[in-house]
C-alpha cells in the first residue's frame, strides 16, 4: 500500500518529469537547433534539453520501478501481471505510433508536406521487422522516439519479479551488481537504454523496502550510497569508463533526487484531489506530446518561418506549455468515448 503522502508526491513527480522531458522533443529537435548556437537564449535551450529534460528520465524510471512493485503485489500471478503491463504500456505505444503514422501520411498526401515521422517512414524499405520496430520499438526505433521508453519499462516490468527476489536475498549485492553490470556490459537488445534499468532497480529497492519513497530514511540513504559506490568502483576498475561518464551518471542521480524532493515539497502544498488530477495528465502528455509538437511546428512554419532563427526560442519554450494545455482540453473529451477507446488511447 502506497502512503498518501507518497501517492501525492508521485503524481506531482510524474507530471514534472514528463513535462520537462518534453523539452527534449520539441520540433525540429536538438540535433537541428544545436547547429544554431548564435540564436538568443541558446544556453538556456541546452539547459532545458540536455540537463532538465534528459535528467528527468532517471526520476521517472525510479517512480516506475516503485509502482511496479506495488502492482506486482496486487496481481494474483505473473501472467496476469504481464497482461496488465502489456495493456498499460505496449497497447498505448502501438496506438500512438499508428496515430502519428496515419497523421503523417495524411499530411503528406493532402498538402504534400513531410513531417519528421514521414521522413523516417520513407527513409528505408518497410520490411516486417522494420514495421515492428516502428510500431513497438523492437530495436528502439519507434516512429515516435519518446515512446521507446515504454518498450524498456515493459521489459523491466517482466523481469521485475526476479529483481524483487534478488533484492530480498541481499539488497546491497542486488543493487551493486545491477548497476555494475549495466555500466560495464552491453545489455542490448534486452534493455536498449541501460540507464532506465539502473534507475528502475532503485525504484524496485525502494518499493520492496516498504518505506516512504521520498524520505531520507537510513535504508534509502544506503540504497543511494550503494549506487554511488558502484559508479566509483566502475570508474576505478574500468579504463573505458571515463570521468565524463562518471560525472554524467552522478549528475543523473543528483537531479533525480532533486526532482523527487521538489515533488514532495510541492505535493505538501496541494490537496490529494489536485495532485490526483495533475497525475492524470502525465501519461496522456507523454503519449501525445510528439503529435502535438508536430502540429504546432507546422503552424509555426506556416505563419512565422520555416527555419530555426532568433524567434525559435519563443516556440521552444511555449510548445510544452501549449501541449500541457491541449492535453487538459483533450482529457475533457474522454467522457464522449467508450471505455475501450479510452483504454486504447490512454490505458485508462
Image: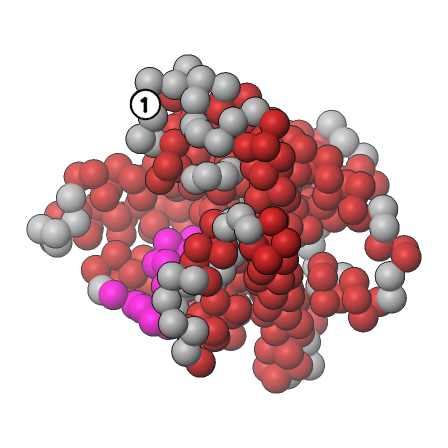
Report the residue that reaches farthest toward the right.
Answer: 336
Mark 1 highlights which residue? Answer: 37
133, above or below 20, in the image = below
Q: Which of the 4 quarters of the picture holds residue 90?
A: bottom right
The residue lying toward the viewer, choosing from 151 and 103, is 103
Measured from the top left, where is residue 71 in percent x and y? Answer: 65, 67
Q: Residue at x 44, y 29 (%)?
A: 307
Report the residue that reaches farthest toward the top.
Answer: 40
Measured from the top left, where is residue 29 in percent x and y? Answer: 43, 40
In the drawing, does residue 117 fall left or right of residue 229?
A: right
Q: Which of the 4 quarters of the picture holds residue 84?
A: bottom right
Mark 1 falls on what kind of element? loop
In the drawing, does residue 198 fall left or right of residue 229?
A: right
312, above or below 284, in the image = above
Measured from the top left, where is residue 47 in percent x and y? Answer: 41, 27
Instruction: Please report the bounds of the magenta region as a residue range.
Output: 186-199
Q: Is residue 165 visible?
A: no
Is-magenta flag for residue 193? yes
Q: Residue at x 62, y 35 (%)?
A: 299
Is-magenta flag for residue 177? no
Q: Residue at x 37, y 67 (%)?
A: 124
224, above or below 305, in the image = below
The residue lying toward the viewer, choosing from 39 and 62, is 39
Give the position of the N terminus as an image quadrant: bottom right
Report the residue that reaches farthest toward the left.
Answer: 239
Type of colouring: secondary structure
Amino acid at each position: 500500500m502506497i502512503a498518501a503522502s507518497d501517492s501525492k508526491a508521485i503524481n506531482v513527480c510524474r507530471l514534472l518529469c514528463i513535462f520537462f522531458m518534453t523539452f527534449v522533443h520539441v520540433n525540429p529537435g536538438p540535433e537541428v537547433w544545436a547547429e544554431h548556437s548564435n540564436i538568443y537564449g541558446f544556453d538556456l535551450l541546452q539547459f532545458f534539453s540536455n540537463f532538465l529534460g534528459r535528467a528527468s528520465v532517471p526520476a521517472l524510471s525510479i517512480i516506475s520501478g516503485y509502482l511496479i512493485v506495488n502492482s506486482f503485489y496486487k496481481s494474483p500471478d505473473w501472467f496476469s501481471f504481464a497482461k496488465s503491463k502489456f495493456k498499460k504500456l505496449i497497447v498505448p505505444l502501438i496506438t500512438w505510433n499508428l496515430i502519428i503514422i496515419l497523421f503523417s501520411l495524411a499530411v503528406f498526401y493532402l498538402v504534400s508536406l513531410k513531417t519528421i515521422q514521414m521522413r523516417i517512414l520513407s527513409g528505408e524499405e518497410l520490411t516486417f521487422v522494420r514495421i515492428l520496430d516502428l510500431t513497438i520499438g523492437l530495436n528502439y526505433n519507434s516512429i515516435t522516439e519518446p515512446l521507446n521508453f515504454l518498450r524498456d519499462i515493459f521489459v523491466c516490468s517482466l523481469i521485475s519479479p526476479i529483481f524483487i527476489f534478488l533484492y530480498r536475498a541481499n539488497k546491497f549485492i542486488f543493487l551493486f551488481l545491477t548497476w555494475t553490470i549495466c555500466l560495464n556490459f552491453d545489455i542490448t537488445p534486452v534493455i536498449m537504454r541501460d540507464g532506465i534499468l539502473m534507475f528502475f532497480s532503485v525504484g524496485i529497492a525502494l518499493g520492496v523496502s516498504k518505506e516512504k519513497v521520498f524520505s531520507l530514511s537510513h535504508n534509502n540513504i544506503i540504497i543511494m550510497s550503494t549506487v554511488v559506490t558502484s559508479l566509483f568502483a566502475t570508474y576505478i576498475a574500468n579504463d573505458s569508463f571515463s570521468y565524463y561518464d562518471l560525472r554524467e551518471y552522478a549528475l543523473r542521480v543528483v537531479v533525480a533526487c532533486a526532482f523527487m524532493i521538489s515533488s514532495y515539497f510541492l505535493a505538501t502544498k496541494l490537496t490529494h484531489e489536485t495532485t490526483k488530477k495533475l497525475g492524470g495528465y502525465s501519461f496522456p502528455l507523454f503519449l501525445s506530446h510528439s503529435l502535438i509538437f508536430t502540429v504546432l511546428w507546422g503552424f509555426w512554419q506556416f505563419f512565422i518561418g520555416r527555419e530555426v532563427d532568433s524567434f525559435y526560442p519563443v516556440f521552444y519554450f511555449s510548445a510544452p506549455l501549449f501541449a500541457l494545455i491541449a492535453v487538459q482540453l483533450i482529457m475533457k473529451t474522454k467522457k464522449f468515448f467508450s471505455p475501450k477507446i479510452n483504454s486504447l488511447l490512454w490505458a485508462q
